[in-house]
Image (tube, grey):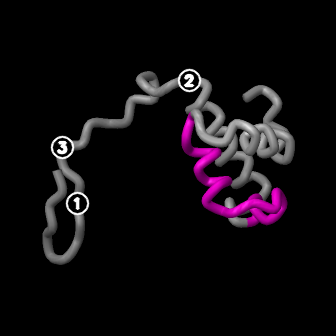
Amino acid sequence: MLNVVSGCNYRLNMPPANLATLPTQATSFRIAAKKRLLELGISVTGLARQLNLARNTVSVAINHESMHPTVKNRIREVLKLYDY
């Protein structure tokens, strides 16, 4: 439920995220990729430039389980995510 109070948005009654309900491999790839980007100081836009792809394509490949498997493989190589 979203309440607006004094021009600010507050989320109320939201249960904590339960990662156990998400697909393990997809979740672990998404988290590992984002963590590695932070470690390397690279943005999704920067990664997209390295891969010579549109930023949206790279973002979708990272965040969506079954989208762009070829791009996911290229991301794995660049970020050295061999276990995901």
Q: Amino acid at mark 2?
A: Thr
Tell me the quadrant of the picture where the C terminus can be found: top right
Disc 3 vs disc 1: Cβ atoms closer than 8 Å? no
The residue labelled by disc 1 is 10
Q: Amino acid at mark 1?
A: Tyr
Check residue 82 for magenta coloring: no
Q: Residue at x 60, y 40 (%)?
A: 67
The residues bearing labels 2 and 1 have C-alpha atoms spaced at a distance of: 30 Å
Q: Residue at x 66, y 62 (%)?
A: 55
For the residue pair 40 and 78, the one nearer the viewer reads as 78
Mark 3 vs 2, N-terminal side: 3
Q: Quadrant of residue 72?
A: top right
Residue 6 x/y as whole percent: 15, 76
- Which of the two discs, 2 and 1, sits closer to the camera? 2
Q: Is residue 39 left or right of residue 22?
A: right
The residues bearing labels 3 and 2 have C-alpha atoms spaced at a distance of: 26 Å
Q: Amino acid at mark 3?
A: Asn
Q: Residue at x 56, y 32 (%)?
A: 27
Residue 4 x/y as whole percent: 15, 67
Disc 2 vs disc 1: Cβ atoms closer than 8 Å? no
Residue 49 x/y as whole percent: 79, 65
The residue labelled by disc 3 is 13
**Bounds of the magenta segment:** 46-65
Crowding around mark 2 (Cα neighbors within 10 Å: few <14, some 14 to 19, many 20+) is few
- Residue 72 to residue 3: above or below: above
- Under circle 1, the secondary element is strand
Identify the disc placed on residue 1. Answer: none
- Which of the two discs, 3 and 2, sits closer to the camera? 2
The residue labelled by disc 2 is 24
Mark 2 vs 1, N-terminal side: 1
